[in-house]
Amino acid sequence: MRDKYFYEVMFDDTSIDVSKEVGLVWSIANSLRGAYTSDKYKDVIIPMVIIRRFECALEATKDAVVAKHKQNPNLPAALLCQVSKYPFYNTSEFTLKRLLDDSDSIASNLKSYIEGFSANIQLILEKLLKFSTQIDKMDKSNRLYSVVKKFSDLDLYPAHVDSMKMGYIFEDIIRRFSENAEAGDHYTPREVIRLMVNVLLAEGCNDLLTDEGKIATVLEIKAPRLIRFNDSSADFAA
């Protein structure tokens, strides 16, 4: 059933309207004008979207995770993940909304909040995106409080924005930030990939996905990765 779902999504020509959510994020990006050039907005916006999405997902179990961590700060990560019901967690008592209660210490408190995330999330925010550098820059230019406040009101709760829609939001944000990128650095939207696959399989391939046991492998040169279609479902192998 899961494979069938991904196959139907891959070849579904309908798209999800994320203009409202992306418009809100883009309006936050515009508040960075002056302190950042437009090509650097992504250094703030992408990490903040990630933080807010994780915060929304963890909200229902956050207090329980914090309580467990207080009882035993050395509790294994796997047990905290069981409490959070996600493969990640946050042990800090801060939230983006609570950070606003102490504007003078918002930079250090935001860093503390990020340090409360599980190691896999810190890897994304700090080692890959180096977000602490942007926190200091926003704080120095008096942008940090405003950015945190606006993101604290952004609705990215899974009950309202499911994983598929969140994927479209993130893709559209990345696409906008890549509009002035160098050749070869552009993001390819999923609709373009879907069209390319449909064209590849359009003619003379009526039996490609119907004959029992038949496997077709498409090599994506740039990545490189293999996309393998097996029977009437799609199996994706990176």
Image (spheres, helix red, strand yellow):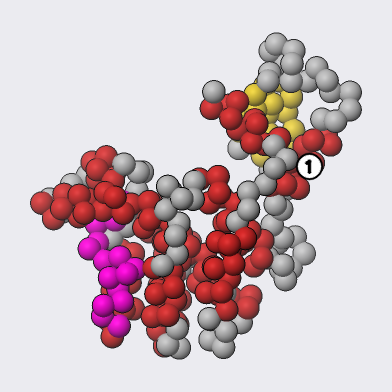
Q: Is residue 156 left or right of residue 183?
A: left
Q: Is residue 9 left or right of residue 151?
A: right
Quadrant occupied by the C terminus: top right
Decide whether residue 98 is among the magenta residues. yes
**Neighbour class for label 1 at 10 Å: few (<14), some, many (≥20)?**
some
Q: Secondary structure at mark 1?
A: helix
- Residue 202 rendering spot, x and y as whole percentages: 85, 30
**Residue 235 sits in which quadrant?**
top right
Compared to residue 94, the image places residue 68 above or below, namely: above
Residue that badge 1 annotates: 195
**Residue 204 sits in which quadrant?**
top right
What amino acid does circle 1 point to? Answer: Leu
> What residue lies at 24% left-to-right and 43% top-to-bottom?
83
Secondary structure mostly seen in the magenta stretch: loop
Compared to residue 209, the image places residue 47 above or below, namely: below
Decide whether residue 156 is among the magenta residues. no
> What residue lies at 10% left-to-right and 51% top-to-bottom?
71
- Residue 119 rendering spot, x and y as whole percentages: 34, 54
Instruction: Report the span colored magenta.
Output: 89-103
Q: Mark yes or no: residue 127 visible.
A: no
**Seen from this angle, which residue lies furthest left?**
71
Towards the viewer: 220 or 36: 36
> What residue lies at 28% left-to-right and 46% top-to-bottom?
84
